[in-house]
Amino acid sequence: MDKSIHNLDDVVPGRNADAWRFVVRVIRLWEVPLFTSIEMVLIDQNGVKIHATIPKQLMYLFQHKLIEGKVYKLSNFTVLLNSGAYRTTHHTYKLIFQMKTKVEESHDYEISLIPNHGLTLTDISQITSRTQDYEYLVDVIGLMTGISAEREFVRDGKLTKILVIELTDHSGKCECTLFGNYVDELHKLMSKAVEGSPVIVIQFAKVKIFRGKASIQNVVGSTTRIYLNPSFPEALKFKEGKEVWFTFSKQNEAIKFAKGQEDVHLFCYQDHLNGYRRFLVTTYTEFWQRYKTMDSKTRHFYEVIQEGLPCHLYFDLEFNRKVNVGKNGDEMVNLLISTVLEALHEKYEILGDQDWIVELDSSTEDKFSRHLIIRIPKAAFKDNSHAGAFVSEICSRILNARGKDKSYEKLFIAKDSITNESVGQLFVDNAVYSRNRCFRLHLSSKAEKTSILLPTERFKCKNLGQSEEDIFMASLICNMDVDCGELLVGKPDSDCVKTQHFDTKLNCNVGNSVQSHPEFTLNTCTSDVSTTYYKGKSPFPSLDEFILSVASMGNIPGKIHSWYLYSESGFMVYNMTKNRYCERIGRHHKSNNVMYVVDLRREVYYQKCHDPDCKGYRSSSRPIPVHVFSNSSVVIGSSGMLDYKQPVEDEQGHQPDDNKPNSEC
C-alpha cells in the first residue's frame, strides 16, 4: 500500500488536517434522527476502527458519495477526542469531515485485505457480569433461544413496538430488547429463516442495567445492525463450535433447535434455587463431562424421552412402604422381570437375559422407588408410546393371571392409608409413557429431596468394576447402540409386531408378519413414518449404497446421517454428513450439510442443501440406475401409498406362498 497512506492507529490531534490520508471501509453508516449529522464507523486493513462524523452543514456534500460496505481513499480531517455516552469504537479519537475532505472510491487490489464487518465480539458472560451501564457499544453473537410476544408502549409521546429475544452462546445467555423499526426488521429476517434456532449477530448494541440485571438493546436511531444466519467468518466459526450446550426455557424451543443439530439429545433440569424447569440440548459426551463434576446436592436432571424417537424399554416402580408393610421390593421386581422376559419372547421371539437390565434405586425409609431400563441387544422400541403399549399389555397379563396364580398378588399395592384400597393397584407407573416424558437420571435427586438415583448391585450393575460413565450411558433410555437394527412396535389389545426400520433385510428371523407374506408394506408397519426420522439403514439398502456413492465426491466419503420416507407422496430424503459438496456453489460448505431427495415413483434423485444461502435450490433430476431396484421393487398399493416388495426365502431357500394369510404376533 502507498507509504503516504496512514494507519488509523496513527491518528492524533494537533496535526494539519490535510496531512491525514486513509484507505478504509465504511462498515456502518447512518443518519442521526432529525438530520443533525451523518455518522459512520471506518476500518483499515489492520482491523483498527474509528468513528467519523459529517456535520449537518456538510451533509449535502457527502451523503451521496459514501455507501456502506465500500472502500474509500479519504483525506483531510479534523481530529477530536472520542467522547460520549455510547461509543462505537475504543479509539481515543474520532474524525470530523470538513469542507475540503476528499472522498474517492478505491478499486485497488488491497481492498480485499480490509475486513468486511469488523466485528469485535463480546462473550455474553462478560455482559451479564456487569453491574453498571457500559460506555461502549458491543458486538454479540449467539443463538436466538427465546422470543417474547410483541408489545407496544408510549415513548416520547409516540406508540412504539418492543420485542425481547434471548441470545445464547457458549458462555451464557442474555436478553436483547428491540424497539421500533428493529422489531419489524427482525420479523422480516425471521420470515426467511430455516428450521431451528437461528444465529443472530447484534452489532453496536448498548449494555443496560435494569433492576440489577444486565442486558443489551438497540441504540435509538439506526446505529445498531442485526444479522441473521450470516455467512461471514465469525458466524461460521460460531456454528462450527464443537461444544454444544444450550438451554431453553420452553421445551418446544429446545426440540425445534435439536432438530437442526447433529448427534444432540434433550435433557431437563430443575433449578436448585427456584425449582423452575429448563431444557438443555447437548451431546451425551459433553453432558457427562459436566454432569459428573456437579455438586450432588444441586443435581436435579432428567432425560427427555422425545416423541417419535426410538427408546429402550423402561419402568418406573414405586410404592409407599409405610402403607405396604411387609412388601419385598426385590421379590416384586424379580417377578415383574420374569413376566416381561416371557412377554418379549412370546410377542417378539426375543430370548431375554437379566444382564440387559439396568436397575437404579432411590428408595427411602418411606418410599420404595426404582427405575428399570431393559436394553435389548440390536433392538429398541419405535418410541415410548409403543413401549407404553407393551407395558400395558404386561399389566393386563398380570391382572388376568392374578386369580389363577397367587404369586402375582405380590405386585399389587395399596395406594395410601386414607383410602386403604385392598391392594388393587400395580406398583408399575403407567403414566411415564406420555409424549416428551422427563425421566430422572442416574446420580440425580429431585429438587428439595436428598435421595439420589443410584445403581443396585444386581443385573447389569452387579459388576461394580464398571465405570460410572458406562453405567450412566447404559441407563439412558434414548441412547441407541450403533448396531441397533430393529424397532419394536407395540399396539393395544395384544397387537404387537416386530419391524425392521433400520435394516430391512427380510429373512426367517424377522417375524411372522413378514415370513408369511412376500410383501413388506411400509405403511402397514409404520403408520407415522412420514413424521419420524431414522438412523441406520433404510428399507432400501441398494438405494442407500447408491446415494453413498453419489455423495462421495472428491475422495471424501459421504455418510447417511438420517433418512425419512414419505410413503404417501413416494419420496425418500437422505440427510448426509461428512461430505458437504454442494452443486450450487461447486464446493464444500464449511458447516451446513446437504441432502438427497429420491422420487421413488419416477426413480430419479436430486440434491438440496441445508445452507440458508441455498434455500430453494435443487439440482436437476437424474435417473437412478436400473440395477438399484433389480432385487426389490417399489409399487403403488391399492391405497395409493408405497409398498416395498422383496422376495423372502425360508430356511430351505423356497419363497413363501403368496396366498398364505398375513398374521402378526
Image (spheres, rainbow, N blue to C red):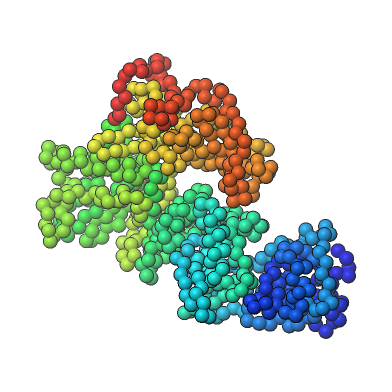
Q: Is residue 353 left or right of residue 46?
A: left
- Quadrant placement of the C terminus: top left
Q: Which residue is nearer to you in this view: 228 or 394?
A: 228
Q: Residue at x 51, y 52 (%)?
A: 195
Decide which of 655, 40 is in the foreground and name it: 40
Q: Quadrant of residue 325?
A: bottom left
Residue at the farthest right position: 3
Q: Residue furthest bottom?
A: 14
Quarter of the image holding residue 309? Answer: top left
Q: Does residue 71 appear in the picture of this structure?
A: yes
Residue occupying image coordinates x 39% and y 33%: 523
Q: Residue at x 21, y 55 (%)?
A: 319
Task: Classify 314 as above or below 219.
Answer: above
Q: Position of residue 402 (x, y in %)?
A: 14, 41
Left or right relative to 194: residue 493:
left
User: Please, is residue 586 above or below residue 161 in the view?
Assistant: above
Quarter of the image where the N terminus is located: bottom right
Q: Position of residue 117 (x, y in %)?
A: 69, 63
Q: Tell me the residue at 62%/57% (across/down).
A: 230
Q: Which residue is at the front of the view, 37 or 364?
A: 37
Residue 578 visible: no
Residue 353, compared with residue 90, is above or below; it is above
Which quadrant holds residue 249?
bottom left
Question: Residue 29 in the image: x percent, y percent?
Answer: 69, 69
Compared with 478, 191 (above or below) is below
- Spot occupied by residue 638 in the image (x, y as percentages of width and height): 38, 26
How many marks do you count on the picture? 0
